[in-house]
Image (cartoon, rainbow, N blue to C red):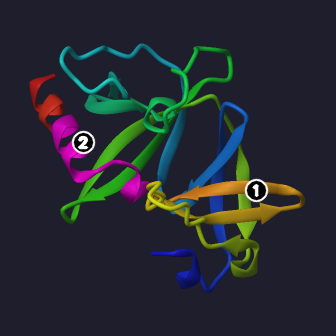
Amino acid sequence: MRASAITETRQYLTFRLGDEVFATDVAKVREVLDLTAITAIPRTPEFMAGVINLRGAVVPVVDLRLCFAMAKTESTRNTCIVVVEVMLDGEATVIGALADSVEEVIDLEPEQIEPAPRIGTIHTDFILGMGKRDVQFIMILDIDRVFSAEELTAMRGQEAVA
C-alpha cells in the first residue's frame, strides 16, 4: 500500500529513533513492552539484537536504528520494544523492534500524508509516506517492507534454533 492508497483516517503509533519520529499502522502493533532481557543469538545479522521470551513464545528483536544505518540503540529508561506483526509469504510473523521511546497514537487524515520522497537510487520502499503534523514530518513505515524476505527468513531460522 502506498500513500496514495490511503483514503480514510488511520491511527498510527509514533515512536522515536534518535531525533526522528517514525510511525506504523496501529493495526500492526501487538503491544509495547518495557525493555527486558534480550538473549543474543550468535552468527545473526548485526541489526538482530536477539530474542525475548514473550509469554512462552520466542520473539526475535531487531534494532531498528541499525536497520536504518543509525547508531546502535542505547538502553535508557524510555527504551522499549514495539511488538509488531508482519506478513512474510502470506504468513504472520511476530517481531520486536527496539525504539528509543514511544510517543503516542495519532490520527492522520489522507491529506496529511505525502508520498515517500524519491531520492535517486536510495531505497525508500519501506516508507509508506510522510505524515505532516503541525510543522513536524513523521516517517510512516510500511512495516511489512522494513525487512527483506531474506532477513525475516534468517530470523525465523533462529527462532527454530532458540
Residue 30 location in percent, x, y?
Answer: 46, 48
Q: In the rendering, at what x and y percent does residue 56 appear?
A: 27, 28
Residue 18, above or below 88? above
| 4 horizontally vs 84: left or right | right
Decide whether residue 152 is among the magenta residues: yes
Q: Residue furthest front?
A: 120
Q: Nearer the viewer, residue 29 or 43?
A: 43
**Image height of 108 relative to 4, above or below:** above
The three-letter code of the residue at mark 1 reads Phe
Q: Amino acid at mark 2?
A: Glu
On the image, numbered disc 2 is attached to which residue? Answer: 151
Query: What is the quadrant of the C terminus in the image?
Result: top left
Q: Is residue 6 left or right of residue 153?
A: right
* Residue at x-position 73% and y-position 76%: 109
Q: Quadrant of the N terminus?
A: bottom left
Tell me, yes or no, whether the highlighted magenta stretch contains residue 123.
no
Magenta-tinted stretch: 143-156
Q: Would you say the residues marked 2 and 1 are in contact, meaning their CB atoms lie under 8 Å apart?
A: no
Picture coordinates of residue 3, whole percent (x, y): 57, 75
Q: Secondary structure at mark 1?
A: strand
Query: Which residue lies at the image location 35% right of the left edge and 55% below the top edge?
Result: 86
Is residue 42 left or right of 95 when viewed as pictured? left
Q: Secondary structure at mark 2?
A: helix
Q: Which mark is residue 105?
A: none
Q: Which mark is residue 137?
A: 1
Q: Quadrant of residue 137?
A: bottom right
